[in-house]
Image (tube, rainbow, N blue to C red):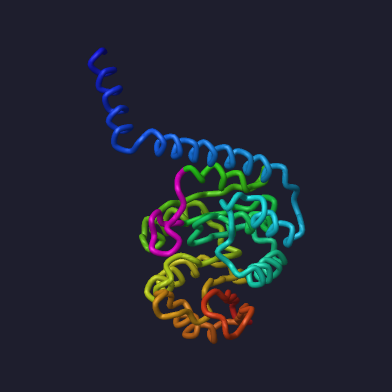
Amino acid sequence: MFNILNYSVKSIMDKIREEGITSIFKRTFHRIKKLFNLIILIHRIKKLKPNLNLNFLLNFLYLESKGMLIPFQNRYEILKLLKIVKKIKPKFILEIGTAKGATLFLFSRIAAEDAVIISVDLPGGNFGKGYPKWKIPLFKSFTFPKQKINLIRANSHAIETLNRVKSVLKSNRLDFLFIDGDHSYEGIKKDFEMYSPLIDDNGIVSLHDIADSPIESKIFVSKFWNEIKEDYSYTEIIEDKNQKGAGIGILKRKI
């Protein structure tokens, strides 16, 4: 017992000598502050009422989330998408690429009161980097009492991940699919080909970053979008035709 205690004290002292007491104190304080802000944010989310104005919800994310839920979206574009999707009141939703969780939160607010919401996100992915485990309680706080949220931290391109999504859906089909994960040409194509067959006949598929992006960004969603959009009834939401990046595409089955 003495040896274990002695070893622990020695480890702590070595750490202090290596990093300095000030550095360790600052890091510990930062972690405590982050935990405190997380608890406060979860409490505020739980107090939000259903059917709130969409602009109010966006303001909440930008102004009151302490940076934890800032959307990786153009405000004009995501607001327009939300208005369109809200009309169908989706019961089964799949988001590929969750990152900070802002769109996951917004989709939970426009979904049916008994919706099943699925998130697929790759930890450490090249686009968005994924979310840390400490954010899981925050994401689970998004739902209303009858809603269910399923967080799948895995590669969307793996057949095992597709099977996990199917297992959650059971015999049901998706009303809304939002693809915002791997932005390489091969990545977006694979996500679309694997998960769009799960969409209901009246459902919606949406792709983020359909506007032309700088080559150095390695975002090639626009190339894939332009190849497939004519096969569907489509809508492009791009605030400025001269902008670089962003943009949201919506696909529906042709009647």
Q: Give the percent coordinates (x, y) of residue 86.
A: 70, 64
> Number of marks in the image?
0
Who is closer to the viewer here, 3 or 154?
A: 3
Who is closer to the viewer here, 226 or 69?
A: 69
In what quadrant of the picture does the C terminus appear? bottom right
In what quadrant of the picture does the N terminus appear? top left
Magenta region: which residues?
Answer: 121-133
Who is closer to the viewer here, 207 or 213?
A: 213
The residue drawn where x is 39% and y is 73% is 184
Report the residue that reaches farthest toward the left.
3
Vertical placement of residue 190 versus 213, above or below: above
The residue drawn where x is 39% and y is 75% is 218
| Magenta-span inclusion, residue 132 | yes
The residue drawn where x is 35% and y is 36% is 20
Q: Main secondary structure of the magenta part?
A: loop
Instruction: Residue 127: name its quadrant.
Output: bottom left
The residue drawn where x is 47% and y is 85% is 227
| Magenta-span inclusion, residue 236 | no
Q: Give the percent coordinates (x, y) of residue 187.
A: 39, 70
Instruction: Residue 155: name its quadrant.
Output: bottom left
Who is closer to the viewer here, 5 or 143?
A: 5
Q: Give the percent coordinates (x, y) of residue 96.
A: 49, 62
Vertical placement of residue 25 versus 171, above or below: above
